[in-house]
């Protein structure tokens, strides 16, 4: 097993079992609700902003290990970033997991999700919270992967 695959398994397991950013930002400026009807994953993302900089990101809901771990790492990575930076990171992450890009311009901890591209049905799990946070930042409250 490759080192990246082992790291992926460790990080997904850790962040799925012990999410650090589960809950609700209080107060929050943006809220989004995401739904993946294919597998049943549901997520609510709340964001606290200050001068278009993300101060807090929290998520709650029900989802598989990949969905939960991705939401938790997303929150960790986006804190302290501007809205514009968050959108660039989302674009890079989406390209990474769909096989359209690399992790070169992403925070290192997101590189572990490169293996998701081998399982196309899991891409929606990995990106649900990301689509939801971007929609929330754009003022859209509901998003679906379908």
Image (cartoon, rainbow, N blue to C red):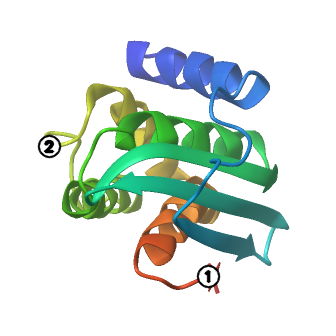
- Residue 112 placement, left or right of 37: left
The foreground one among 2 and 112 is: 112
Q: Residue at x 69, y 28 (%)?
A: 19
SS for callout 2: loop
- Residue 74 placement, left or right of 26: left
The residue beneath circle 1 is 141
Quarter assignment of residue 4: top left
The residue beneath circle 2 is 105
The foreground one among 74 and 82 is: 82
Q: Residue at x 23, y 41 (%)?
A: 106
- In the rendered view, tell whether residue 97 sits above or below residue 68: below
- In the rendered view, tell whether residue 141 sits above or below residue 70: below
Estimate the x, y position of residue 75 in percent, counting from the top left.
Answer: 50, 42
SS for callout 1: loop
Residue 102 in sight in this render: yes
Estimate the x, y position of residue 144 in percent, counting from the top left.
Answer: 65, 82
Q: Earlier in the sequence, mark 1 or mark 2?
A: 2
Quarter assignment of residue 9: top right
- Residue 11 placement, left or right of 76: right
Q: Quadrant of the C terminus?
A: bottom right
**What is the CA distance from the residue labelled 1 to the residue labelled 2?**
28 Å
- In the rendered view, tell whether residue 23 sits above or below residue 42: above
Estimate the x, y position of residue 64 in percent, counting from the top left.
Answer: 78, 47
- In the rendered view, tell whether residue 102 sits above or below residue 8: below
Q: Nearer the viewer, mark 1 or mark 2?
A: 1
């Amino acid at each position: 097993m490759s080192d990246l695959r082992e790291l992926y398994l460790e990080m997904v397991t850790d962040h799925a079992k012990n999410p650090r950013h589960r809950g609700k930002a209080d107060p929050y400026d943006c809220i989004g609700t995401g739904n993946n009807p294919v597998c049943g994953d549901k997520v609510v993302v709340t964001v606290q902003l200050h001068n278009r900089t993300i101060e807090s990101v929290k998520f709650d809901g029900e989802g598989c290990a990949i969905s939960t771990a991705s939401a938790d790492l997303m929150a960790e990575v986006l804190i302290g970033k501007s809205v514009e930076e968050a959108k660039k990171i989302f674009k890079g992450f989406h390209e990474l997991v769909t096989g359209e890009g690399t992790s070169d311009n992403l925070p290192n901890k997101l590189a572990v999700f490169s293996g998701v591209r081998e399982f196309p049905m899991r891409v929606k799990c990995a990106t649900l919270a990301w689509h939801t946070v971007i929609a929330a930042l754009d003022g859209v409250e509901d998003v679906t992967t379908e």
